[in-house]
Amino acid sequence: MLSKKMLEELNKQMNREFYSGYLYMGLATYFRKENWNGFAHWMDMQAKEEFDHAMKFYQYIFERDSVPEWDALEKPPSSWSSALSAFEVALEHEKKITAHINDLVKLAREEEDYATEAFLQWFISEQVEEEASIREIIQHINQAPDSASHLFLIDRHLAQRKE
Ligand code: FEO
């Protein structure tokens, strides 16, 4: 069984992952409203991933003979000033999530909860990938931030995201 403290912290992370899904759906809605359907598709796929992450926490908590608890989710923002600022917000959000995952690993080590430490390893690698992929998109946008045709090409490219 999980310790009370570990259960509380894993629960918070489960809810943060659900919020991440909400945030990406807010971003998808913004891009779709602006007719950037490739960007919107990328955000849809990202939201799905986040809901999957949340479910990994949900299932893990049960596997450790504990019960997850649901928190109310904050309303995500619905507009940003540009594609660039939208991705910058996503990157800042992911950095915060990475810090929370690192804190969880630290707690697992302090408690000598090796099962939770092993469970969290997947998230450590996932955060490296997520930050890198968002950073790459920001770099592409920054090659010509004021060019609509450049953004159009990135939009077409992001429309091909499969998972
Ligand atoms: Fe599940 Fe993007 O962190």
Image (tube, helix red, strand yellow):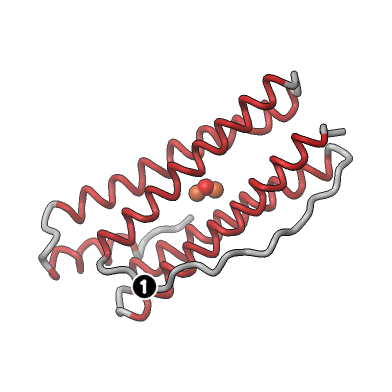
Image side of residue 54 versus residue 28, left or right: right
Using the image, determine if residue 33 lies above or below residue 74.
below
Which residue is depicted at the point 39% across and 69% down? Answer: 40
Q: Return the residue nearer the eye: 76 or 50.
A: 76
Which residue is depicted at the point 30% across and 79% down? Answer: 34
Q: Secondary structure at mark 1?
A: loop
Image side of residue 6 versus residue 122, left or right: right
Using the image, determine if residue 27 lies above or below residue 16.
below
Q: Place residue 157 in its image quadrant.
A: bottom left
The percent position of residue 66, horizontal first and vertical second, equals: 86, 43
Using the image, determine if residue 158 lies above or below residue 61.
below
Q: Label 1: which residue?
A: 79
Using the image, determine if residue 131 lies above or below residue 49.
above
The percent position of residue 130, horizontal first and vertical second, equals: 43, 44
The percent position of residue 100, horizontal first and vertical second, equals: 56, 38
The percent position of residue 23, horizontal first and vertical second, equals: 49, 63
Q: Place residue 105 in its image quadrant.
A: top right
Q: Residues within 10 Å of mark 1 (few under 14, many from 20)?
A: few
Which residue is depicted at the point 36% across and 73% down? Answer: 79
Image side of residue 32 versus residue 51, left or right: left
Name the residue type under label 1. Answer: Ser
Q: Place residue 51 in its image quadrant.
A: bottom right
Q: Return the residue nearer the eye: 23 or 124.
A: 23
Number of numbered callouts drawn:
1
Q: Quadrant of the N terminus?
A: top right
Which residue is depicted at the point 83% across and 40% down? Answer: 63
